[in-house]
Amino acid sequence: METLVILAAAAAAVIATILVVRTMVRAARPPLRLPHEDAMIEDEEDGLMDPIAAPPVSPIDRSAPILDLEPVERPAGKPADPRSTER
């Protein structure tokens, strides 16, 4: 019975060793990098300030006129309905 426990412990140690070795081999792969990341590292400049791509075009039309908004007045005596979308 003692021999069986020793063999089970030895088998567990061998399986654990195999799993550790396989994990280490997988970790030995080269790290994944973005296409421009190597160039950014070689330039030794601030990576946060180095533009990888052109900034996106803003969807806001800044040349449009600014409208002054005025509140809509409700008729007197008619309370506002809290479920209504119009306010």
Image (cartoon, helix red, strand yellow):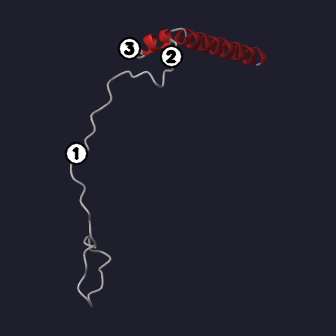
Pointer 3 or 1: first along the chain? 3
List the residue tagged with mark 2. 45
Question: Please, what is the three-letter code of the amino acid marked with disc 1?
Answer: Ser
Residue 42 in view here: yes
Image height of 78 relative to 63, above or below = below
The front one of 38 and 28 is 38
Question: Please, what is the three-letter code of the amino acid marked with disc 2?
Answer: Glu
| Residue that appears at 66% across and 13% down | 11
Pointer 2 or 1: first along the chain? 2
The front one of 54 and 26 is 54
Eye-nearest disc, 3 or 1: 1
Mark 3, secondary structure of its residue = loop
List the residue tagged with mark 3. 35
Query: Would you call the spot at circle 3 few (<14 residues within 10 Å), some (14-19), or many (20 or more)?
Result: few
**Left or right of 87 in this view: 52:** right
Q: Position of residue 72 (x, y in %)?
A: 25, 75
Question: Please, what is the three-letter code of the amino acid marked with disc 3?
Answer: Pro
Mark number for residue 63?
Answer: 1
Q: Quadrant of residue 59?
A: top left
